[in-house]
Structure formats: C-alpha cells, structure tokens
Image: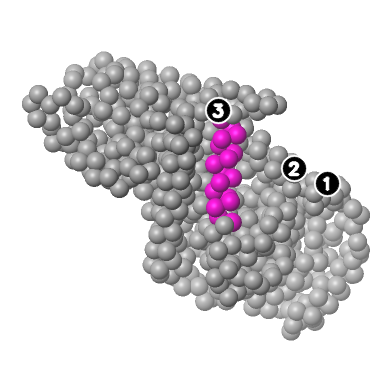
Amino acid sequence: MSAAEAVVHVHPAGRLLALVGNPNCGKTALFNRLTGSNQKVANYAGVTVERKEGRLKSAAGKTLRLLDLPGTYSLHPRSPDERVTCDVLAGRARGEKRPDLVVCVLDATNLRRNLRLVLAVKRLGLPVVIALNMADLAARRGLAIDVEALGQRLGVPVVRTVATQGEGIDELKALLDRPDVWSPSGGVAVASPASQEADHAAVRQILQSLNLDRHLPHLPSDRVDRVLLHPLVGPLILMVVLFLLFQAVFSWAEAPMDAIKAGMAALGEAVGGALPDGYLRSLIVDGVIAGAGSVLVFLPQILILFFFILVLEESGYLPRAAFLLDRLMGSVGLSGRSFIPLLSSFACAIPGIMATRSIANPRDRLVTIMIAPLMTCSARLPVYALLIGAFIPNREVGGGLELQGLVLFGLYLAGIVGALAVAWVLKRFTSAGSQVRPLMMELPNYHWPHPRNIAIGLWQRTEIFVKRVGGIIMILTIALWALSSFPAPPAGAPGPAIEYSIAGWLGRGLATVLEPIGFNWQISLALVPGMAAREVAVSALGTVYALSSTAEDAAQALSPLIAESWSLPTALSLLAWYVFAPQCISTLAAVKRETGGYKLPAIMLGYLFALAYAASFITYRVSSWLLG
C-alpha cells in the first residue's frame, strides 16, 4: 500500500468529513477531485478496502480532513470492509474520532437503493450533506431530479455533482463553509423509520413525490449483456479477451524493451570505460547497472498488462467476469465474489489479500487468501519474460499467434488451475466447503474508460516499479554483489572470483537440495534474495552471471548467457517453480495481519514450497526424458 493510501491516526487541527456511499456510486472519484489525491478508481464493489485520508480546502480556504470510507449498502455490516465504515460513523474506530460531517454520495441513476443509506446515517445523529453524483447519466436516461425538492424531503442540503468531470465540486466546497450544515438537522420531512421495512416505505414515498417511482427502459448495457453474459458465448469471449491480453504483452513490448536494453548497454559501456578496474567499477557495472537494468527492461510488459486490466475495470466488464466464473468457482467451494480479489492478485498478492475484506463469508475469505499467491503477480512477469525470451522461439504458430504469448498464457493458466485445485481440496476437508453460496453483486453499466483514470493507474504502477528497482531491488543487488565479491579468490585461482566468495559457498550448499529439480548453484543463489521481491531474482541472476562471466557485455547479455549455460529442462523446471513458489515476504506479512496469527502464513509457506518442488521435479524429469 502506498503512503498516500495509508491511514493517518493522528488528529491534526481541522474538522473531519467522511465520504459514505454504496459501491459504484463514484465516491472515490469524488474524493480524488476534492483532495487532488491520486487514489485508485475502479468500477466494481470492494476496491476501497481501507479508509483513505486526504486534505481539502473549502471555498473560503479552510483546511478540512476527508476520509474515503469503504462502500456499504447499509449500516448492518456483512463484511470486514463494511464494518470499517460502520465503526467510524458510530465512533467505535480505534484511533479515529467520529466524523463532524458526513457527505453521502448518491448514484442519481439508482436513488431507490442509495436513499436507504442516507436515512440510516441520519438516524445516527450526524450532520449530513448529499452529493447527487452521476447526475449527467440520470439526465440522459430521462430522470429529471429536482435537487431542491429532494433536499427538502430529506431535510439536508443536496449538491448536484459529476465527479468524473469535476462538475459540482466548487459548489460542494462552498457548501462546507456554511455553519448550519455542521449541525444535525431538526428532523426529516418523512416519518423517521425504525426498521428496514420502514426505510423502504420512506424511500418509496420520496420517489413518488418527486415523480421518480417508475421503471426505466432497457439500457444499451442490457443489450450488450445478452451477448457477454450468455452461458456459452460469454465464457468464450472472456477466454479470448484474456488470451489476447497475454499475446499483446509480448508483441507490443518488443520495441520499447529493445530500446531499454540498448540504453542500459550504452550506459554500462560508458561507465565501464570511464572507471579503472577494481571494486568500484565492478560494483557499479556488474552490481548496480547489471542488476537494475535486467529488471527495468521488463517495465513495458508490466505496463501493457496493467493497461488492459485498467481498461477492463473502467469499462465495467470485470464484475461480468466474476458472474461468468461463479459456476466454476462454486465447483471448488467458492463464489464469484472471490474472483475480484484473485484478479487483483495478478497485480500483486498484497492488495488482492486485502480486497478479500469485501467477502462476507469467513470461510470463503480465508480460502481466497490462501490461494491468492498462486495468481501470477506482476513481479513474476520479469522472470517469465526472461526465460521465455531465452528458450522459446519468437515465431508465429497457427493463425498468426505468437508462440511466446501462448507459453505466457499457459503459465498464467497453470497458476489459476493450481489455485482452483487447492480450493477444491480445502472444500473436501472443511465442513463448510459444500455449502451453496449464491452470488449477489451489482453489475454497473458499461462506459468508456476515462483516460485520466487509466493514466493515473499506469503512472502509479510505474512509480511503484521504479521505486522497487531503486529501493529493495537495488539494496539486495548490492548486498549480493558484496557477498559475491568477498572474500577475494586465492592467488592463481582458475575459476571466476564469485566461486570462492560467500555467495558461491551458499549457492553450492543450496544446489545440493535443488539439484534434483535441475537448478545449478547460480539459480539456487538467486532464489534467496528473490524471497524479498520476485523481480530481485532477475537482478540477482544478472549480477551473478556478470561476475561469473569473462565477457565484457555479460551485464547486458543475461538472456544469451543462460540460453548457453542452461538446458531446456532446467528452464522449464524454473518456470514451474515460479508458478507455485511462495510470494515475497511482504505477502506473508499481509496474510499474518489479515488472519491475526502465524499459523496460516506458516501453512501457506509450507504448501507452496511443497507444490513448487513437486512441480519442478516432475517438469524436469519428464522434459529430460522426452528430450533424451
């Protein structure tokens, strides 16, 4: 989680506002507009799994604190993320005071459902202001909403907003300067409901008085869903979309990757030529440039992958994917609601594990956490790309498809199949595994992805990746260089210096355990820092082989080096290892935090290592036998 997303528990001077609303009402987009914060905006429920804080200035220049709370349909929490919202509004949140004002964000196209939450919040005695969001969509659907009349019926101020376009933001900021909005209203124009049934009656009365109690005609999204949600055609379209995504990861990234390779090679040559032989030259060329360059080259592929994921999020297609996969998930004891956290794990397992807070069933949530690391996160992509580029020919197969893209698709599919298999085993051995859990989730309307949100998402991913390269990856790469350079080899030693270093001793020791699956001492050594961050394995291999090789361009020629020194069964075995091997240490820490103990992280670590070793052993032995 980035620093901008961290929850701040201190209470600086200034009043506290809280944004509250149903999922998919545009609440986080409004938060971004009010604070200028680049928070993630997605088009499905459960994306806001933690309350996020920002600062906004009112029209009069007053600084106010603003909390973006997880989306909820009611104040009767059914999942951990909804409980966060309820605890903050009730003043039960540890380390956070009760809000001074609640901004209820309503989806103007679905007032029947959204108004129930407003009535519940008013019963808490908190001052309330309403942001009637998505007002432009409501108008295009023929809904003429009288903002003043709605405010009179509810007894609270109402501001018309279109958060994605920035409309109504100035009016909302100006409203916050009025002293009267910070005091609880004297009452509601309708009878105060005491139950959910009374809430339904009150909302129906309000809609009837505003001439909004009528059915809308079928929307274009409904016609599109007849095709995309078809029980036969829908899953086929989903498979084609995912398949084309992985094809693009290789075919589109070739040119920018070549440019980065050439740039890093030129940098290495320039720095190497300017420095005399010695430890400083080795540190910079073989350690820093070789390590960082071997990872940076995969940035285009990661951005292409995230571009497609963001487009699918923004368009509203992801909830449909969850719906299509509900039957498949149900066969292994889960529901389609687990799909979104698992999809988030393709970016990184940590936000995917955190997103399980939107799953109400405790058993389903724990199983989803346990299988989330089997989803192929973006940190594995550099390893896959390196090995596929070195050992899989870059040629087209039937229908103009890229063979390398097919192999990458197969690796992602292997992780998914492995996750479903583990979930099926847990279903067989848990008492609640056979229960049927019907999927209930909102399907937002389709719309064109907003370029601003796509750009924000890609910039955030670039920033995270570059910071990792310049942070933990750089630190571990330099540490590995030091271990690989000291102690110095004895006089007249015939082999490379690294073979006599601490790293060489460690690598040979690990190789005795990993030799049955085809790993040499260089691979065994690279796996150790790879536990801190998956990308480090690539930079570690770059450093190890730069120090092992006598070639001048070894720092920039990792792919040809491993193609010459490894067999194909070894490469396939390493690919199988990374399909199942445990995620980084940060992932295990996230599991510990979410489950409240060390038992489940220990079980996760053990079963993932066992799966990885078994898969690599079978892959290495079978491929060696087939290839003679």
Q: Is label 2 or label 3 in front?
A: 2
- Can you give x and y, in whole percent of width and height, for residue 329 in the image? 65, 59
Numbered circle sitting on residue 253: 3
CA gap between label 3 and label 1 equals 31 Å
- Can you give x and y, in whole percent of width and height, for residue 43 in the image? 68, 51
Splitting the image into 4 quarters, where does residue 593 fall? bottom left
Residue type marked 2: Ile
Helix, strand or loop for disc 2: helix
Q: Is residue 416 magenta?
A: yes
Which numbered disc, 2 or 1, marks the residue that appears first in the sequence?
Answer: 1
Residue found at x 62% / y 59% = 338
**In the depicted view, which residue is nearer to us: 610 or 337?**
610
Splitting the image into 4 quarters, where does residue 624 fall? top left
Q: Going by the image, does 206 lie left or right of 514?
A: right
- In the image, is residue 311 above or below residue 231? above
CA gap between label 2 and label 1 equals 9 Å
Residue type marked 1: Val
Q: Are marks 2 and 3 in contact (CB under 8 Å)?
A: no
Q: Residues within 10 Å of mark 1 (few under 14, many from 20)?
A: few
**Residue lying furthest bottom in this view?**
194
CA gap between label 2 and label 3 equals 24 Å
Q: Which residue is mark 2?
A: 237
**In the depicted view, which residue is nearer to us: 236 or 223?**
236
Which numbered disc, 2 or 3, marks the residue that appears first in the sequence?
Answer: 2
- Can you give x and y, in whole percent of width and height, for residue 558 in the image? 38, 26
- In the image, is residue 220 above or below residue 216? above
Residue found at x 41% / y 26% = 563
Q: Residues within 10 Å of mark 2 (few under 14, many from 20)?
A: some
Which numbered disc, 3 or 1, marks the residue that appears first in the sequence?
Answer: 1
Numbered circle sitting on residue 227: 1
Span colored in magenta: 404-420
Which quadrant of the rendered structure holds the C terminus?
A: top left
